[in-house]
Image: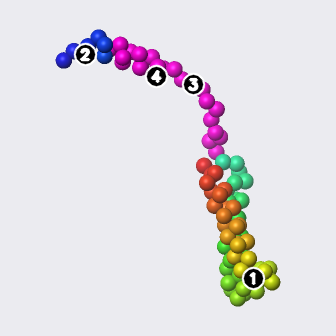
Amino acid sequence: MPKSKLRKKVIEKHSHEAQVVVDAPHAPLESPKWLAPTMVGGCLVGLFWIVTFYVTQTKYPIPGIGAWNMIIGFSFIGVGFSLATRWR
């Protein structure tokens, strides 16, 4: 079935709009070289901190602050995870 003239005009109008390309600034395609080692390092330091806290029966890595050692360990892991969201 042939298309109506009205339909051809609509298609032509939309095809003309599709040809307009707007140049927008693009984000970098690669991550900075320091990002991956810092991300992995933060996660490993946090893991080591928490394992040390449990293995030494809550006496180390910083004696006297008790369960705050867990908060410090999870903070390192959190920094590593937040950097992981920026990795490409």
Quadrant location of the N terminus? top left
**x and y percent of residue 8 in the render?**
32, 14
Q: Residue at x 67, y 73 (%)?
A: 47
Residue 25: assigned label: none
Measured Cα–Cα span from mark 1 to mark 3:
57 Å
Q: Which numbered mark, 1 or 2, is in the foreground of this view?
A: 1
Instruction: Say which element carries label 4.
Output: helix
Instruction: Give the mark nearest the N terminus, 1 or 3.
Output: 3
**x and y percent of residue 59 in the render?**
76, 86
Measured Cα–Cα span from mark 1 to mark 2:
78 Å
Q: Are marks 1 and 2 in contact (CB under 8 Å)?
A: no
What residue sits right under mark 3 in the picture?
22
Instruction: Say which element carries label 1.
Output: loop
* Mark 3 neighbour class, 10 Å CA radius: few under 14, some 14 to 19, many 20 or more: few
**x and y percent of residue 43 in the render?**
67, 66
Q: How many marks?
A: 4
**x and y percent of residue 12 in the render?**
38, 15
Q: Residue at x 41, y 20 (%)?
A: 14
Amino acid type of the residue tagged 2 in the rendering = Lys
Measured Cα–Cα span from mark 1 to mark 4:
63 Å
Q: Are marks 1 and 3 in contact (CB under 8 Å)?
A: no
Instruction: Give the mark nearest the N terminus, 1 or 2.
Output: 2
Identify the image's colour scheme: rainbow, by chain, secondary structure or one colour.
rainbow
Amino acid type of the residue tagged 3 in the rendering = Val
Q: Are marks 1 and 4 in contact (CB under 8 Å)?
A: no
| Image height of 5 relative to 14, above or below | above
In the image, is 16 to the left or to the right of 3? right
Q: Could you tell me if residue 83 is visible in this image? A: yes
Where does the magenta region start and end? 8-30
Residue 3: assigned label: 2
What residue sits right under mark 1 in the picture?
66
What residue sits right under mark 4 in the picture?
18
